[in-house]
Structures are given as C-alpha cells and as structure tokens.
Image (spheres, rainbow, N blue to C red):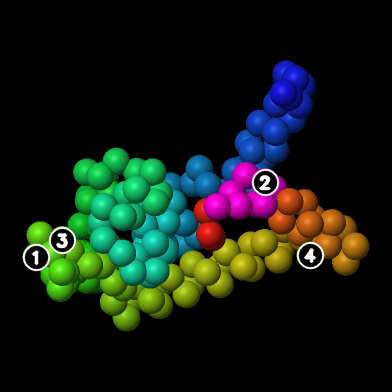
C-alpha cells in the first residue's frame, strides 16, 4: 500500500496535468463545448446509445441526456430509432459534428506536441513509456 507521501505525489501530478491540459477551463480549446460535452461527442463518434454513453463515461443519465440534447440542437449529433428496440435511440455525428471532432482531435494532438517538444527524443520516449505503463496498470481492461 502506498504511503501518504506517495499518494500525495500522484495527486500533485493529477492537479498539475489537469491544469496543463486546461481541463478546468469552461470550454475545450476554442469551441462552444465543455469538457464533458466534448467527451460525449467523442463517445458518440464510436456509435452508441445515450445509456451506453452515460455508463461508459460514468455520467448521470439525465446529465448525459441534456448534453446530447444540446449537441443535437447545435447540429453535431443526430438521433435515429434503433432497429431492434423502438424505445432506444442510436446516436451518430452529423457532418458538423465530425468536423468539430476532427478539430478537437487536431488541437489535442498539437497541445501534447507543444507540451513535449522541448524534451529530448530520449525523454519523450521515457515519458511515453511511463504513460504506457500507467495505462496498462490502471486501465488495461478499458480498451481505449
């Protein structure tokens, strides 16, 4: 079991990384979306139902529903009735939603490149290996 100092170091990293990525900002990059809204948009891109998205992102179903309603109103998401269950809705991105998601992905890639660009190739490799280790230990069954 980790001691208090070790736990404190992990929490310090989480706070610093959250600040570095701007996760506490009201908007993702220069879009009209909040971080949770952008995450829902990303999940919809993989094809899903509102309930699956709420479960996957560990969000309240009514909160997820409000986000989906906003994304639909902004013409980023479209709903269609499930072929197997008329009570269920399938979600997909509109052309506008795909364009916005591509912008967010590009901006996210640039953000990480800017974060590591001053590191040597060796340090970049070490950083990547550290993230790979963290992902394997904490999220090995997550599939993302």
Q: Which residue is mark 2?
A: 137
Q: Image point 22% across, 51% down: which residue?
A: 65
The alpha-carbon separation of the residues under discs 2 and 3 comes to 35 Å
Name which of mark 4 and mark 1 comes first in the sequence: 1
How far apart, in angstroms, are the residues tagged by discs 3 and 1?
Answer: 5 Å
Mark positioned earlier in the residue sequence (2 or 4): 4
Question: Which residue corresponds to mark 3?
Answer: 88
Classify the position of the N terminus by image quarter: top right
Q: Where is 138 relative to 6, above or below?
A: below
Quick check: marks 4 and 1 in contact, CB under 8 Å?
no
**For the image shown, how many numbered marks are present on the structure?**
4
Q: Who is closer to the viewer here, 10 or 98?
A: 10
Query: Label 1, label 2: how many angstroms apart (C-alpha)?
Result: 40 Å
Q: In the displayed structure, does residue 15 sit left or right of residue 104?
A: right
Cα gap from disc 2 to disc 4, whole angstroms: 26 Å
User: Any mark on residue 117, and which?
Assistant: 4
In magenta segment, residue 28: no
> Is residue 96 found left or right of 39 in the rendered image?
left
Residue 3: quadrant of the picture: top right
Q: Give the mark toward the camera: 4 or 1.
A: 1
- Residue visible at 62% across and 44% down? 138
Rendered location of residue 103, percent (x, y): 48, 72
Label 2 element class: helix
Please report the residue visible at 25 percent of the width from the left and 45 percent of the height from the top: 61
Q: Is residue 137 left or right of residue 57?
A: right
Secondary structure of the residue carrying numbered label 3: loop
| Residue for badge 1 | 86
Question: Is mark 3 in CB contact (under 8 Å) with mark 1?
Answer: yes
Magenta extent: 134-141
Sequence-first disc among 1 and 2 = 1
Q: Residue furthest top?
A: 4
């Amino acid at each position: 079991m980790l001691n208090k100092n070790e736990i404190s170091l992990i929490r310090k990293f989480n706070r610093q990384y959250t600040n570095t990525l701007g996760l506490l900002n009201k908007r993702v990059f220069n879009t009209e979306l909040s971080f949770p809204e952008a995450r829902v948009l990303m999940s919809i891109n993989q094809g899903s139902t509102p309930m699956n998205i709420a479960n996957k992102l560990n969000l309240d179903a009514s909160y997820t529903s409000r986000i989906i309603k906003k994304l639909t109103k902004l013409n980023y998401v479209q709903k269609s009735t499930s072929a197997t269950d008329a009570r269920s809705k399938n979600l997909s991105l509109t052309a506008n939603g795909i364009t916005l998601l591509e912008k967010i992905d590009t901006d996210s890639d640039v953000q990480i490149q800017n974060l590591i660009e001053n590191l040597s190739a060796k340090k970049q490799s070490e950083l990547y290996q550290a993230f790979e280790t963290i992902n394997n230990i904490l999220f090995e069954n997550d599939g993302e």
